[in-house]
Amino acid sequence: MASKPGLLTDWPWQKLGNLKYLVLAPWVVHSVYSFVTKDERDRDITNLLIFPILLWRLLHNQLWISLARYHTAKSKHRIVDKSIEFEQVDRERNWDDQIILNGLLYYIGFMYLPGTSRMPIWRWKGLVLTTLLHMGPVEFLYYWFHRALHHHFLYSRYHSHHHSSIVTEPITAVIHPFAEHIGYFLLFSIPLLSILFTRTASVVVFAGYVTYIDFMNCMGHCNFELVPKWVFNIFPFLKYLMYTPSFHSLHHTQFRTNYSLFMPFYDYIYGTMDKSTDKLYEDSLKGRKETPDVVHLMHPTTLQSFYHLPPAIASLASEPYSSRWYLSMFWPIPYEFMLLTWIFGSTFTVERNVFDKLKMQTWAIPRFSFHYSSPSQKDAINSVIERAVLEAENEGVKVLSLGLLNQGEQFNGNGEIYVQKHPNLKIRIVDGSSLTVAVVLHSIPKGTKEVLLRGNISKVVCAIAKNLCQRGIQVSVVGKDNFEKLMLRIPTELWTNLLLSTSYTQKVWLVGDGELSEKEQAGAAEGTHFIPWSQFPPKKKVRKDCIYYSTPAMIIPKALQNVYSCENWLPRRVMSAWRVAGIVHALEGWDAHECGDTMFDMEKIWLASLRHGFLPMQGQGHPLI
C-alpha cells in the first residue's frame, strides 16, 4: 500500500480473493458460445483467442518468476544482494490483477471497436506502425508520466507502492495501485488502437506487442543480469533501444534516475541516466562467486508440493503446504520437471538464506517421497545424494544437513554410507537427530508420567525412549515387534519403564511416520497431546478436543534473512529441527559428523540453538523432562 493511498487505489474485485477470476467467466463463456453456435462462415476466431492470450500471459509471467528465483538463489550475476521477505511476497501476490483488467478491457474493446472482427493472422504494416508508435509516443509519454509519478504528491499516493520493493522480482513490474494501471493501459493502447483504426491490425502483432511488454517488464525486474555484452558490442545502438535488468534496478535503488520504459534514450536526452549504469552492468555481468557455508538437502514430498517450492508459485510457497484440488489437473508438470532435472543435473537450488555472515542454500533432490519407498530407486537416489555431497565438498561447503527422507536409517544409515565411502570428507554431514530429540523432549508437557510411543524404531525413537526412561517416565510402545526392537537398543536397567501398550489411555502420544489413523485418534482420551517425532505430520487431524503439535521445528531469529517461503507444512519463519541443526553445527564450528549411530549431547545443542536466537515453538521451552 502507498504511504498515503489515493483514489482508486484498491482493485474493484479485491474482496473476491481467489474467486476474482469469475469476473472474466461471462466474457469467456460468451466468446465460446458465439463461436460454437454461429455458422462456419460467420465465426470470428479473434474474440475466441483473447482467453488463450490471457493464459499465455499468466504462464509467461510464471516462467519468469521461476527463472528469476532460481538464478537469484544460485547465480553469481545477482544485482541487488539484499533480502526478500514475506511482506514483499504478500504485497505482490495480486500480480495477476492487471491481466484480469486487461482481459475485461480486451473483451469490451473487441465487442464494440471497429476492425477487431475477423482480424487476419499477420500484417507487416501493423508491425511497423506498432514499432514506430511505441518508440515515439509511448516511450516519450511514459518517461514524463513516470517522472510525474515521482513527484511527492503522486509518489506518496500511488507509485511508492511499487517502490516498496528494493529487491525486485519479475512480478514487481506490475505491482501498482488500480488507478496507475488504468494510466498504463491507456498508454499501451496507443499502438493497438492505431492499428485497429488504420485496418492494419493482426493477431500476431496484437499478441506479440502484449508479450513484448510482459517480457521487457519481467526482464527489467528480474534482479540478475542476463543480457550478454557481445550484444552491445555487435549492435552499439541497442544501448539506446533496450534497457538491461541492472539499468532498471538502479531506478529502484536511486529513485531519481533511469526513468525510461524499455528504451533508455530519453534518459540520455534529458540527462537522467544514472552515472553508475555502465559500471553496475559490467559488475553484474562479471558476477561474484559465492560459496555457501551450509547446504540443506531436501526433496519434494508429493506431486503438488512441487508448486510449493520457492521457484514455483510464489503465493503457495509463502504459505504452509496443503493440498489443493486444482493442482491435481497439472500433474504432468512436476513429472516433466523431475525428468529434466534428472537428465541435466543431479540437484537444483531452491532457496538462498543469510544469517549474519553465514551463507546458506537449500538444494532439492528431484524425486518425490513415494520414490524413496521403492527398493528399485534406493541405489539411484543414494547416488544422487552422494553426488550432492561431493559437489558441496568441492565448492567448500562446511556443513550439509540431510532433510526429510534423505537421511533414513534403512535408506542410507542416517547418511553414514557417504562418510564410509569418502572418509576424508572436509564437509560435515548432519542428520539433525540430536536436536530433533531435544525438541521432542522439550515439547512434552511438564509433569508427564507416561507416554505412548508409536512408529517404526529408529535412532531418534531410541534416544527419546532412553531419555524418558532415565527420568522415570513410563514409555508404552505400540506393536510387539517395535517393543522387542526397542528393548535391544536401550540398557537393560531401563526396561522397567518400558511397556508393551495394551491401551490408548496415555495423554501424551509420540507419533511418527505420518500415519496416525482416524481410528487411533478416535480412541485417544480427551485432551491428548499428539507430538510427532518424524519429519512428516499426521495426514489427518480429526479431534478438536486434542492438541496437535508441529513436527520438530524451531522459530528462526530475525537475523536470518531472505526467508520468503515456508518449509513444507511449517508456519512462516519456522524451520525443521533437521535444518536448524545444520545451521547451528556451522555456527558452533563443530568438527564432527552427526550421522549413522552418532548423536551429540541433546541439551548442549538445544542450548546452542537458543543462544543463536532460535526459539521454541508453542508448547516447547520448559526444562528438559
Image: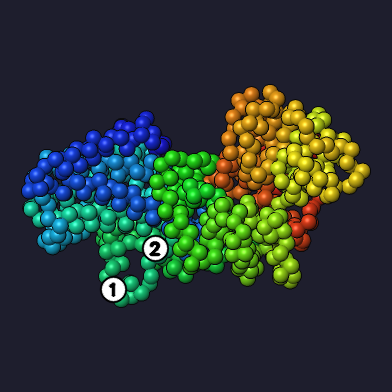
Q: Using the rendered image of the protein, determine whether residue 241 is visible from the camera's viewpoint.
A: yes
Q: Is residue 437 above or below residue 358?
A: above
**Residue 136 in sight in this render:** no
- Indicate the quadrant containing the C terminus: top left, top right, bottom left or bottom right: top right
The residue beneath circle 1 is 235
Image coordinates of residue 490 in percent, x first then y, are 85, 47
Q: Is residue 8 left or right of residue 534?
A: left
Q: Position of residue 82 (x, y in %)?
A: 52, 53
Instruction: Give whichever of discs 2 and 1 has the lower sequence position.
Output: 1
Residue drawn at x 74%, y 67% is 420
Residue at the spot 62% in from the left edge and 44% down from the top edge: 536
Q: Quadrant of the N terminus?
A: top left
Residue 266 is left or right of residue 275, and the answer is left
Locate residue 505, reporting x and y percent. 75, 27
Q: Amino acid at mark 2?
A: Thr
* Cβ–Cβ under 8 Å for marks 2 and 1: no
**Where 235 sits versus 267, above or below?**
below
| Amino acid type at mark 1 | Phe
Q: How many angstroms separate mark 2 from mark 1 (CA)? A: 18 Å
Q: Farthest residue toward the right? A: 493
Residue on which the image places disc 2: 277
Image x and y of residue 426, in percent: 71, 68
Disc 2 is placed on an element classified as helix
Q: Nearer the viewer, residue 201 or 358?
A: 201
- Residue 93 numbered tag: none
Residue located at (30% from left, 48% from top): 55
Q: Residue at x 39, y 33 (%)?
A: 17
371 on left or right of 21: right
Q: Give residue 549's quadrant in the image.
A: top right
Q: Quadrant of residue 130?
A: bottom left
Which residue appears farthest toward the bottom when viewing the image? 234
